[in-house]
Each structure stands twice: as C-alpha cells, then as structure tokens.
Amino acid sequence: MRASNRADLARASTLVPNAWGKTMKTLLLVTVAVGCMVGALPGCDRSDTQVSQKTVELYGTHCARCHEVGAANAPRNGDTKAWAKRLKKGEDALITSVKEGLVAMPKMGDCASCTDDDFRQLIQYMSR
C-alpha cells in the first residue's frame, strides 16, 4: 500500500468516532444498498441489465464503502471511463486482482465467501 493511501485511510478512519464506527458503517452500507436497489444513487441505475439481489447485497456489504466514493483510487461504481481501462486487462485478470488484493483493496475484496462468479457479477455491475 502506498504511503498516500495509508494516510488517506488513516484520516478517513478518524472521521467517525470508534464507538459509533460500527453503527455508522452498517447504516451507510444499508443506505447504499437500498439506494442502489431503488435506483436513487448515481452510478446505481442498472435498468439495462438484470442484477441479482445477491449482487446488490454483496456490493452494499463489501464494495460500496470504497467504490461509491473512489477511496484509495478505487474505480467508482458506474464510472465507465475508469472501468474501461481496467476491463482491457480482461475479466480473469481483474478477478485475480480482487482475489489477491490490490493497493488498499484487501484480499478477496473483503468477501471471503465470494466465488469467481460473484466477483464477475460485481465487476459487471460496477463497470456499467
């Protein structure tokens, strides 16, 4: 992890006091997941594709905290230009990056139970 990313993450972790951190994190994830389900958040409109409830829930639980705001240079959900650069590497290479971890993204994208197909669906969801 680059020093600037560590500093950004350290600053972000001080924004919410530890006593409230878990509650606020849960509230944020639920808000993002519900907002995406009803299409109320930018980058979440997926009217042109069928997205499973599981994919939306996995996104809200494991991906949204970084991919909604672009934390640590994560490509934002729905930012087709940022995702196009990554998609040129191929889906298999992206899945390998998720599984191994990349920059600030933890191994398995912080989703130990996710399968390659889950990651494939999540990448497709975020890149449109």
Image (cartoon, rainbow, N blue to C red):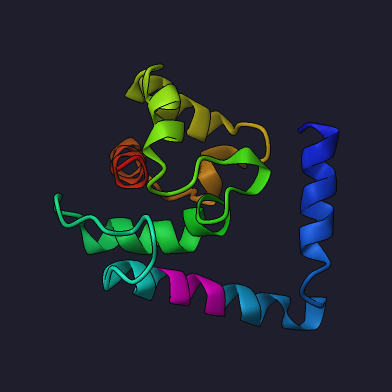
Q: Which residues are magenta?
A: 27-32
Q: Nearer the viewer, residue 127 or 23?
A: 127
Residue 37: percent from left, percent from top: 28, 69
Q: Nearer the viewer, residue 106 or 39?
A: 39
Horizontal side of residue 84 vs 99, given as left or right:
left
Residue 10: percent from left, percent from top: 83, 54
Q: Quadrant of the N terminus?
A: top right
Q: Residue at x 36, y 64 (%)?
A: 57
Q: Quadrant of the C terminus?
A: top left
Horizontal side of residue 105 vs 63, given as left or right:
right
Residue 127: percent from left, percent from top: 35, 40
Please, is residue 112 above or below residue 102 in the view? below
Please, is residue 94 above or below residue 40 in the view? above
Q: How many marks?
A: 0
The image quarter in which residue 60 lies: bottom left
Horizontal side of residue 58 vs 100, given as left or right:
left
